[in-house]
Image (cartoon, rainbow, N blue to C red):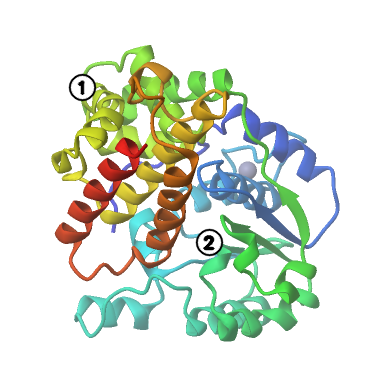
Amino acid sequence: MSTEVLSPNPPLAPWLQTQLRSLLTQRGHAWLLSGPSGLGQFDLALALARAWLCEQATADGACGVCGSCHAIAVHTHADLCMLMPETLSLALGWPLDEKTQDDLDSKKRKPSKEIKVDAAREAVSFTQFTRSRGTTKVVLVYPAERMNTITANTLLKTLEEPPGAVKFILATEAAHQLLPTIRSRCQGHTMHWPVFDEALAWLAAQAPTEGKAGALPAAADLHTLLAAAGGRPADALSRLQAGPSNASAQHWQALPKAMARGDTSALADWAPAQAVDALQKLCHDVLAVKAGAQPRFFSAKDLPTSKTGGPGFLALGAWSKELAASARTVEHPFNPGLMLESLASRARLALNAK
Ligand SMILES: [Zn+2]
């Protein structure tokens, strides 16, 4: 269990605060917050749950100081059911039920990356039987796409006709993977993208406490990391938390040319999924520049240049397809080291093709 001190009222990023205000003006017992990763759907979902359960909520959300807000801050609210994969509950410090915790403690099995059907059954019984401390009960499901068909069907009826004052918030980074029946029973909210500069300011405000480097990250490094994350602030923050920001930014800037040289060591510290993601971004930017557009993830000066006009559309298109195929299987590489080597050698070929 995590021992970190939890802030009773964590400040919400400004673009999430705007969305929270808007959601709170609308009726609805089941919301589906969807959008690509890194836009803050979990934070928004929790802020919405906090506001619904707060004893003195305002149009801006929860008060942050009442008994309910405090109970959520210490992760023990009797009227809030967090339906998440076990790996995520552990990572975020939300308690598991006793039986699951026992199984994991005694190493009978590993924590699940999926939302288990047992957990969904618990959630259904939570909506039916648990005595509530206030007037509302909330089930928060995240990431909703981690429910398989059986788990989703377990939840379906309750989602359609929730007993009493039960509200649902589902948050997802892959809405297309959800059962259509789940999607159709929720009111949809598409996550807003923050403006780049707004996200940059937010990232800079998180950096002093979140960065591990000790020193404040330079603005230029934060800019590089946010661009590397495609402008998704929460993804950029994860990069920042993973290591010193200057090293991470320099590594990113050096990547395109290292790949053009076939330098495998540039991928060495990464998991295969991260490497594939980075190469997809590189391929995207090389294609964009070739088509006369601006690069999105890298700075134009860092991309490999060639006197012959660089790789052709055909070679880049083929590389892009291969990377997409790798992305689908990358969770279970046969041999991660070999995979990185083959990714690097394929990148060199594509970037040097005529
Ligand atoms: Zn409150």
Residue 165 seen in render: no
Q: Quadrant of the N terminus?
A: bottom left
Q: Residues within 10 Å of mark 1 (few under 14, many from 20)?
A: few
Tag of residue 192: none
Task: Please say if 159 is above or below 299.
Answer: below
Q: Nearer the viewer, residue 108 or 289?
A: 289
Label 2: element kind? loop
Q: Nearer the viewer, residue 311 or 105?
A: 311
Residue at the disc numbered 2: 143
Q: Residue 179, image x and y in percent?
A: 67, 74
Left-right relation of 56 to 350 = right
Q: Residue 210, image x and y in percent?
A: 33, 31
Q: Residue at 58% of width from left, 59% of height from top?
A: 174
Task: Please say if 95 is above or below 305.
Answer: below
Q: Earlier in the sequence, mark 1 or mark 2?
A: 2
Does the CB distance between marks 1 and 2 fall below 8 Å?
A: no
Query: Where, by quadrant of the figure, is residue 166 drawn?
Result: bottom right
Residue 113 seen in render: yes
Picture mark count: 2
Left-right relation of 302 to 62 = left
Gap between marks 1 and 2 measured at Cα: 32 Å
Say which amino acid is labelled 1: Gly
Q: Residue at 49% of width from left, 85% of height from top?
A: 118
Q: Nearer the viewer, residue 199 or 101?
A: 199
State whether label 1 is within 8 Å of ligand 1. Answer: no
Report ligand 1 position as a quadrant.
top right
Q: Residues within 10 Å of mark 2 (few under 14, many from 20)?
A: many
Query: Where, by quadrant of the figure, is residue 164 drawn?
Result: bottom right
Q: Residue 99, image x and y in percent?
A: 35, 83
Q: Residue at 53% of width from left, 31% of height from top?
A: 288
Tag of residue 214: 1
Query: Where, by quadrant of the figure, is residue 66 drawn?
Result: top right
